[in-house]
Image (spheres, rainbow, N blue to C red):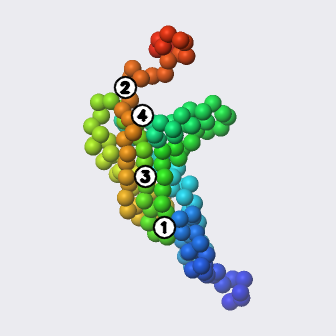
Amino acid sequence: MTAATQPREVSSSVAADRVGKDVEKASGHGATTIADIVVSKIAGIATREIDGVYDLGGQAARVVGKLRETLPGSPSLTQGVSVEVGERQAAVDIGIVAEYGIAIHDLADGIRSNVIAAVENMTGLEVTEVNITVHDVHFDDDDVTDGSTTGEPRVV
């Protein structure tokens, strides 16, 4: 076997440099690197799939998200999501706004289950925890006004 055909070993210093930034998984046929942003997007999408989630993020994140929506391009899938990724495990923190009338404990359980399944199935990482913060509850009456000085709701 020549040096060109032998499997390349990933040095432990390279993997150690990537902890908390990217995850590098080595096999006999090469390495796979998973960036933190990938885990964040998977968790954000999995959270939005659950009925009863109105939005993600706290007030500041939602304001920035609304501004971002006015710019060309896609909305941020990582809004309200932060992750800590190690070599084999990930921890996820999610901030949400819940729809009024939804049992928050059931909503949190549904989010947690969906995020764990999505991240573990797509990345092979073990999800050690999914922490959920409910920042607000959305009422149908809370919809954005039309911008007039009267504060009347916009009729769509």
The dot on residue 139 is 2
Q: Earlier in the sequence, mark 2 or mark 1?
A: 1
Q: Is residue 116 left or right of residue 78?
A: left
From this view, report whether residue 120 is shown above or below residue 67: below
Q: Earlier in the sequence, mark 2 or mark 4?
A: 4
- What secondary structure is marked by label 4? strand
Q: What is the spatial separation of the Cα atoms under label 3 and label 1, in whole angstroms?
A: 15 Å
From this view, report whether residue 16 is shown above or below residue 50: below
The residue lying toward the viewer, choosing from 39 and 28, is: 39
Q: Earlier in the sequence, mark 3 or mark 4?
A: 4
Q: Earlier in the sequence, mark 2 or mark 3?
A: 3
Q: Mark 3 — residue?
A: 93
Q: What is the spatial separation of the Cα atoms under label 2 and label 3, in whole angstroms?
A: 24 Å
Residue at 38% x, 62% y: name it.
128
**Contact, mark 2 vs mark 4 (Cβ under 8 Å):** no
The residue lying toward the viewer, choosing from 75 and 67, is: 67
